[in-house]
Image (cartoon, rainbow, N blue to C red):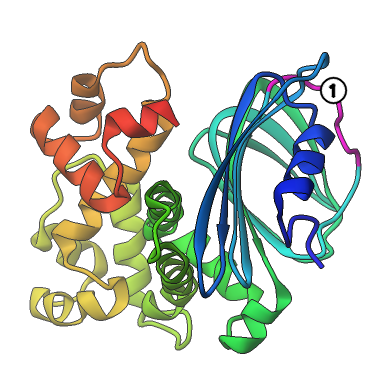
């Protein structure tokens, strides 16, 4: 059983007390296949450590939004019985695994296998993050592998967008939220199949992928892709949607919005500056695309 698998009025209080919340308005969203209930709690403690923002449970997904406000209470080396997806909204942390260490920053998305030993040290406080615990039955019942989640994270810019869309769905907290969240996660898991991991793509697809990701903030033409890959423009045009699940223009816009996420939490950088640095034509163009792909406006994202 996941540590946060079930939630009730009493268990909510114990859970929040465990994290020693201080003046926290905790929005606790209970979701199952039949109902969706919103409950509000206000707790105080003399030791401010972790500002617990929200919690949602579905039949096979568990979603938390938390803020680590100081380094007290570091759990040391540990593991989760459920696979875990974490999207860093702001701050920094050092994640140590068995053979590797990772410096996680705002807009980073990480995945931990069920039972994978690790240690997280928060190096930039406060650190705020969205966490999804994925129960084992989710993988078996939907024919999903944990490797498919890793493939999605490494290859598709849609991965981060779908996590943000799941968060946005929490804000609606209506009778459609449970199924909507489940659908978004299943779409997340299926992305690895869409972007060509099931069968080996032609060599030119890898060349185009690397070219686009290296030059994401430049003006890229079909002619340039053809010259870089050595493939006829007609071939690229015909097969591009099959391997990238969208048009060329849409894929480049996704890359630019994805790169903008790491800049958005810096209040010293204006939206206009971010728009131009990510090669959008103007601020309005940037805002329109940001909201389209993340389901949040730039202003909403900055307030997360």
Left or right position of 249 against 144: left
Q: Which of 173 and 225 is in front in this view?
A: 173
Who's the residue at 40% across and 67% down the image? 180
| Residue 192, position as x, y percentages in the image | 46, 74
Instruction: Quadrant for residue 24, please give it.
Output: top right
The correct choice, above or below, for 140 with respect to 64 in the image is below
Who's the residue at 24% across and 42% down the image? 290
The correct choice, above or below, for 283 with respect to 210 in the image is above
Who's the residue at 53% across and 75% down the image? 33
| Residue 54, position as x, y percentages in the image | 58, 41
The correct choice, above or below, for 146 with respect to 283 in the image is below
The C terminus lies in which quarter of the figure? top left
Q: Nearer the viewer, residue 60 or 208?
A: 60
Instruction: Quadrant for residue 261, please give it.
Output: top left
Who's the residue at 17% across and 63% down the image? 248
| Residue 129, position as x, y percentages in the image | 59, 38
Q: Does the magenta stretch include residue 124?
A: no
Segment colored magenta: 69-76
Residue that carries the numbered disc 1 in the rendered image: 72
Instruction: Quadrant for residue 12, please give it.
Output: top right
């Amino acid at each position: 059983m996941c540590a946060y698998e079930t939630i009730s009025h009493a268990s909510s209080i114990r859970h929040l007390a465990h994290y020693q919340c201080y003046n926290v308005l905790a929005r606790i969203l209970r979701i199952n296949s039949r109902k969706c209930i919103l409950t509000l709690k206000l707790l105080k403690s003399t030791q401010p450590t972790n500002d617990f923002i929200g919690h949602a449970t579905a039949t096979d997904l568990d979603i938390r939004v938390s803020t680590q406000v100081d380094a007290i209470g570091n759990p040391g080396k540990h593991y989760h019985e459920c696979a875990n997806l974490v999207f860093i909204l702001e701050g920094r942390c050092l994640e140590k695994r068995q053979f590797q260490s990772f410096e996680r920053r705002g807009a980073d998305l990480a995945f931990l296998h069920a039972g994978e030993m690790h240690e997280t040290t928060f190096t930039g406080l406060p650190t705020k993050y969205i966490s999804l615990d994925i129960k084992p039955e989710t993988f078996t019942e939907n024919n999903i592998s944990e490797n498919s989640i890793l493939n999605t994270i490494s290859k598709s810019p849609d991965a981060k967008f779908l996590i943000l869309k799941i968060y946005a769905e929490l804000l609606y907290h209506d009778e459609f939220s449970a199924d909507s969240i489940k659908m978004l996660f299943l779409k997340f898991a299926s992305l690895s199949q869409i972007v060509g991991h099931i069968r080996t793509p032609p060599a030119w697809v890898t060349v185009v992928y690397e070219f686009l990701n290296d030059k994401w903030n430049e003006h890229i033409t079909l002619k340039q892709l053809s010259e870089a890959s050595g493939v006829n423009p007609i071939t690229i045009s015909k097969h591009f949607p099959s391997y990238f699940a969208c048009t060329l223009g849409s894929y480049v816009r996704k890359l630019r919005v994805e790169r903008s996420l790491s800049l958005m939490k810096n209040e010293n950088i204006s939206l206009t500056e971010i728009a131009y640095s990510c090669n959008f034509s103007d601020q309005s163009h940037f805002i329109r695309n940001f909201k389209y792909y993340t389901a949040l406006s730039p202003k909403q994202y900055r307030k997360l």
